[in-house]
Amino acid sequence: MKWLTVFILVVATVLADMFQSFEMKRQAVAIQELRPGRFRRVLARLARRRFLILGVVLMGISFFAFLRLLSIADLSFAVPISAASLVVETVLAKLVLGESVTRLRWAGVLLVALGVVLLAV
């Protein structure tokens, strides 16, 4: 049950972040639009973005999966193992979103991945 919860947590987090990033790049919000008089219009426009809404729902699933994981595993396991999402997100950011990932970031991702593997052993 613990590993299923980790899987749900990681998948939900990764998909949520990917959908949110995709939508925010597609529909950028200028800083001028965040003034109090325009804030309502910005929210209304963002509320019509399906992937953004899906991302928010998936973040909720991720949150509740994390709470579930905390109820069945130690904090010293739950927090570091959730870092697996960082590894998957970086790979997908490169492959799906076409983002540039420097060698230094890849090195960081490798270190995080090694840490996650050590936790799983």
Image (tube, helix red, strand yellow):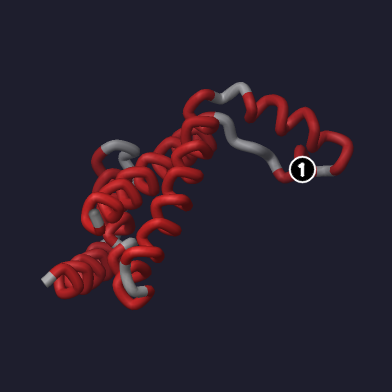
Q: Quadrant of residue 93?
A: top left
Task: Give the left or right position of residue 89, taking residue 62 as reference.
Answer: left
Which quadrant of the figure has residue 102?
A: bottom left
Q: Residue sitting at 17 percent across and 71 percent down?
A: 114
The single residue placed furthest to the bottom in the displayed view is 76
Residue nearer the viewer, 116 or 97: 116
**Is residue 53 rendered to the left or right of residue 62?**
right
Whether residue 104 can be seen here: no
Q: Pointer 1: what residue?
A: 34
Q: Give the total of numbered labels.
A: 1
Residue 112, quarter of the rendered image: bottom left
Quarter holding the N terminus is bottom left
Disc 1: CA contacts within 10 A as few (<14), some (14-19) or many (>=20):
some
Q: Quadrant of the C terminus?
A: bottom left
Residue 10 location, x and y as percent? Answer: 31, 51
The foreground one among 96 and 71 is 71
Q: Position of residue 110 (x, y in %)?
A: 19, 67
User: Would you say 59 lies left or right of 38 here?
Assistant: left
Please, which residue is most extreme toward the right here? 37
Residue 89 higher or lower than 56, as above or below: below
Residue shown at 47%/52% (left/top)? 63
Badge 1 marks a residue whose secondary structure is helix
Q: Amino acid at mark 1?
A: Leu
- Residue 81 appears in the figure: yes
Q: Residue at x 72, y 45 (%)?
A: 31
Q: Position of residue 71 (x, y in %)?
A: 39, 64
Residue at the spot 32% in from the left edge and 58% down from the top edge = 86
Q: Nearer the viewer, residue 92 or 2?
A: 2
